[in-house]
Image (cartoon, helix red, strand yellow):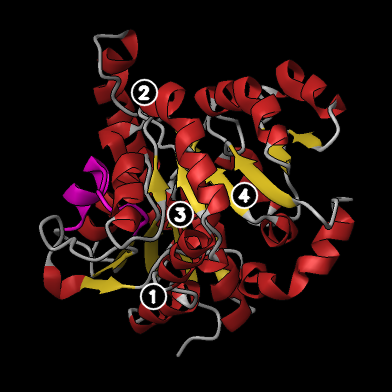
Amino acid sequence: MKENPKFIISGGGTGGHIYPAIAIANELKARFPKADILFVGASDKMEMQKVPQAGYPIKGLWIAGIQRKLTLQNAMFPLKLISSLAKSFRIIKSFKPDVVIGTGGFASGAVLKVASMMGIPTVIQEQNSYPGITNKLLSKKANKICVAYENLERFFPKENMILTGNPVRQDLLSVAEKKAEALDYFKLDTSKKTLLVLGGSLGARRVNQLIAKEIDWLLGQGIQVIWQCGKLYFDEYKHFGEKEGVQVLSFIDRMDLVYASADFVISRSGASSVSELCLVGKPVVFIPSPNVAEDHQTKNAQAIVDKHGAILLKEKELDDQFEIVFEVLLNDKGKQESLSENIKMLALPNATQQIADEIIKLIK
């Protein structure tokens, strides 16, 4: 086995594609300290900042997804695709990777397509319960497809698929032991239950509107609220932090402590969030974003709800249903316990290690 293998990792567009890619890179680097790891992303997306912050080099492709309506972007798509395939070919030819790994997004589509045409082993890491178009097309030629949900045989070749789960932050494995530290860190009232509201790194407009409307009602239930509203919405909602029992944050650095402090969670259902919440095992109400390709988030949440591990509220149900559903959850200890137990049973805590195992098997 080489002691300095070379890996190209490609994925991006959203945190849901970037953070798993970085987690895989960190695991490979831990096993092969002399490994050479290069990221490839979309040149105008957040991976161009996040990957260098994590300590890895990245090259950008001129690529973007297809919009659902007739736009100039769509007219440019064939040109961008040809440009990205050509640049991917040049990158792979000069870098000479042993394995190429894709975690989703259009940039990974171009890189994995070229790698498989050049006979280089490829691995797809699919985070969602309903795969996107890029990964469905690429899977026919991929050597291994690491998935996070059961029953994906209808999308991927069964013989190349392995259930690993999604890479998650390793510090979430021990949140149960951090409750006292977490209550102190966030200066919480130890006599009250805590609701954690997660809107994703950028924020979620409809979730924020809901909490703004319901905050006095929530406080009236005798709970305290940590509300991560996202950086796009922070200026609009930060004044709610003047209320006693409310903390409004744009971003959370210590996810392990914020999960440890929470008794209930309201969250979007992107793949990474769902995987983290399975590991953490708190009663959760999912409010899927309806504006995501192929309605991934509803399908991710539904996969948990089908196993009695969470509550799902659609955006259109919030005005009529939220107070009823949340009050029942708040007052039903048995329901809280069964949701916690059931969602924990779906956790796959060794995902990152297993994915790395599969990648390493492909080094020639």
Q: Secondary structure at mark 1?
A: helix
127 inside magenta stretch = yes
Please tell me which residue is depicted at 38% across the width and 62% down the height of the picture.
100
Q: Indicate the quadrant where residue 158 lies.
A: bottom left
Residue linked to disc 2: 316
Q: CA distance from mark 3 to mark 1?
A: 24 Å
Please tell me which residue is depicted at 27% across the width and 57% down the height of the picture.
306
Residue linked to disc 4: 51
Residue linked to disc 1: 359
Nearer mark to the viewer, of 2 and 1:
2
**In the image, is residue 144 above or below residue 54?**
below
Q: Residues within 10 Å of mark 2 (few under 14, many from 20)?
A: few
Image quarter hosting the N terminus: bottom left
Which residue type carries mark 2? Lys
**In the image, is residue 200 above or below residue 24?**
above
Please tell me which residue is depicted at 30% across the width and 9% down the height of the picture.
71
Which residue type carries mark 4? Val
Q: CA distance from mark 3 to mark 2?
A: 21 Å
Q: CA distance from mark 2 to mark 4?
A: 36 Å
Q: CA distance from mark 1 to mark 4?
A: 20 Å
Identify the mark nearer the N-term, 1 or 4.
4
Which residue type carries mark 3? Val
Can residue 248 be seen here? The reply is: yes
Which residue type carries mark 1? Ile
**In the image, is residue 197 above or below residue 171?**
above
Q: CA distance from mark 3 to mark 4?
A: 22 Å
Residue linked to disc 3: 274
Q: Secondary structure at mark 3?
A: helix
Residue 77: % across, % down: 28, 22
Residue 175: % across, % down: 68, 69
Please report the bounds of the magenta region as a residue range.
125-139
Nearer mark to the viewer, of 3 and 2:
2
